[in-house]
Amino acid sequence: MHMKRRWVASVALVAAVGLVLAACGGGNGGKKASGSAASKVEVFSWWTGGGEAKGLEAMIGDFKKNNPNIQFINAAVAGGSGTNAKAVLASRLQANQPPDSFQGHAGAELLDYIKAGQLEPVDFLYDQLKLRDVFPQQLIDQITFEGHVYSVPVNIHRANVLWFSPSVLKEAGIAKPPATIAEFITDLKQVKAKTSKIPLSLGAQWTADHLLDAVMLGDLGVDGWNALWKQGADWKSPQVTKALQDYNTILQYTNAEAASTDWQLAAKDVVDGKAAFNIMGDWAAGYFKELGKSPKVDYDWAASPGTDGVYQWLSDSFTLPKGAPHRDAAVAWLTEAASKQGQDLFNPQKGSIPARKDADTALYKDYLAWALQQWQTDKLAGSMWHGVTANNAWHTNIDSSVGLFLKNKNVANFQKSLVDAATSGLAQ
Ligand code: GAL
């Protein structure tokens, strides 16, 4: 009798283990592992460190509370702006092994995934959660294709921010941050002449791409910039030449060891009083907060030179890949990312403003209070580097052009390769 009971018990155990394994998605058995005991969700992003992971963790914490039966697998791949992550993601999608949800930028980048047939529309979720009422229409437009919505935006980041060190500016005798690209160049010269500090800190190559966005927007203005991504764009114009020349001049004031560091260390130079300026998206605000630095004391900010009144925006959104192994759990994650609670936990840490219009504004302080207010009044310009204006192929071509330019500093060749990149980018 005793023996028999034990045997029964172990059979039950084997069966339970089998169920767990099946639900864990080892093969097709895991496909429909909805909120059941052994479900899990694999979420792919590039938020691994400095300010970025903290925001994600805050949202994961809330997700776990709301979904105690779903195991969260954080599949983040390190590397600012997703340079490494996007390559890993592309090969997984190619091999038909999508994560349950992945981070994608609203705009041209998302459109690539949609057109490649890699995403499921999420209209059902928009209907169920009434999301059309809570996100700004212009943002919904950026994630809609042929009448269907394809992702859930979790935030809005601002790319065109000039971070500066009040103490280094004081030392250099600069009374206020530069309002134009010309003033910026004058200030960079002055920092170099009067201090031993880095005039403009820079990191890995992608931060030079990011800087190019800011300098071109600053020189061309919002209308000139926005026109570059539409049919009829004129990349050969003397205005573009001038912007590229200015970019070349500005690069002369950056630090030499830049290429080996990611954005965090470059931004840190400012709050540590080692550099006067850094141009970086507002994820830097999340990082500075994590470092315990004081706004207006250890660092201050302004619109990047020449861009006052313009919000160069980008938005992180989460997707539902076709063939997601744990589709129901992925929908639970998207529900979290769409929620007011999730967004209000994530964004104050991440250094972004919420995509939702009804977030609790009291939670957004210092830099973020400024950003929220600017978002209400500024004109909009899309970020190239962060997926809004150029699709992945065009983006890669611009990056290659920048890479060559950083070596040879030949403005004429640089412009020519940007013209070529635009010609093929606009033809797609
Ligand atoms: C952007 C992304 C931000 C932030 C940044 C630096 O592309 O949208 O959320 O992570 O890269 O890694």
Image (cartoon, helix red, strand yellow):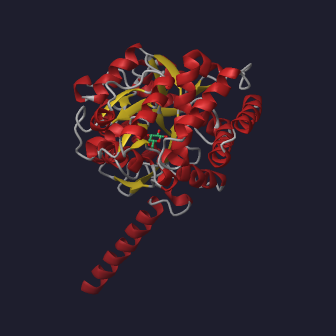
Q: Quadrant of the C terminus?
A: top right
Residue drawn at x 22%, y 38% as measured from the top left: 294
Name the one closer to the observer, 422 or 105.
422
Identity of the residue furthest to the bottom in this view:
3
Q: In this view, does 254 lie to the left or right of 294?
A: right
Residue 104 horizontal/vertical position (percent): 52, 39
Residue 216 horizontal/vertical position (percent): 58, 27
Residue 160's place in the image compared with 97, above or below, is: above
Identity of the residue furthest to the front in this view:
193
Residue 251's place in the image compared with 375, above or below, is: below
Residue 22's place in the image compared with 31, above or below, is: below
Residue drawn at x 59%, y 44% as measured from the top left: 322
Q: Which quadrant of the figure has residue 161?
A: top left
Q: In the rendered image, is residue 24 in sight?
A: yes
Residue 83's place in the image compared with 131, above or below, is: below
Residue 391 horizontal/vertical position (percent): 64, 35
Name the one closer to the observer, 414 or 24.
414
